[in-house]
Image (cartoon, helix red, strand yellow):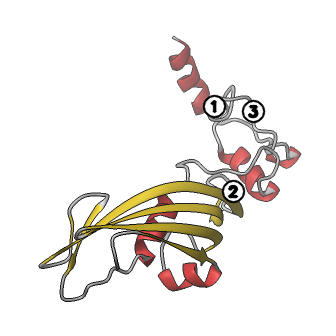
Amino acid sequence: MKENTRNYEYLLDAQYFSDIEGDDVHKGNVAVVLAVTKREDIYEMNFHLSGVVVIPCNRCLDCMDMPIDTKARLIAKFGKDYAEESDEIVVIPESEGYINIAWFLYEFVVLAIPIKHVHPQGKCNRQMSAKLRKYAPKTDGYDGQEEDPTFTDSDAEQPVDPRWDALRNFKEE
């Protein structure tokens, strides 16, 4: 490749996520725009990933769509053996002369997913929400917010174990 910039486009679809066999994401539809700039013996790769991945909700475990829109950078340079010098710098063996970016793309997608991913209020699986309400300790709110409206099943109302009352009194003191 001469010293210039080339652009590439990829689509990470259900087949890609199935083939990559990652633990976090199994389905999705993410468009990737890659700009590769060659400077001397260094290749700078700038990625823009946007689309949707399907992940489990942290609250009810049902699948949910999570929008992805992120940018990432990777620098590849030649050396004797493969090495990842940092989060952005990769050394590829001169004897091979290429880099497979499939796993890097997957990592960029996973890093773009927020730590907490839940359905919007009222969209969680009602059966799971009822079970969570049944076994959750009674508090003034859910996750420090107002009560979650997904927990409205009348069957979920159970008498409170009296041992919790002693702990609440201790907390109030």
Looking at the image, do the residues carrying marks 3 and 2 touch, with CB atoms under 8 Å apart? no
Q: CA distance from mark 2 to mark 1?
A: 28 Å
Mark 3 secondary-structure assignment: loop
Q: CA distance from mark 3 to mark 2?
A: 16 Å
The residue identified by callout 1 is 162
Looking at the image, do the residues carrying marks 3 and 1 touch, with CB atoms under 8 Å apart? no
Number of marks drawn: 3
Residue 20, position as x, y percentages in the image? 48, 81
Quarter of the N terminus within the rendering = bottom left
Mark 1 secondary-structure assignment: helix
Q: Amino acid at mark 2?
A: Cys
Label for residue 60?
Answer: 2
Residue 21, position as x, y percentages in the image? 48, 80
Q: Amino acid at mark 1?
A: Pro
Label for residue 147?
Answer: 3
Q: Residue at x 63, y 37 (%)?
A: 137
Decide which of tag 2 and tag 1 comes sooner along the chain.
2
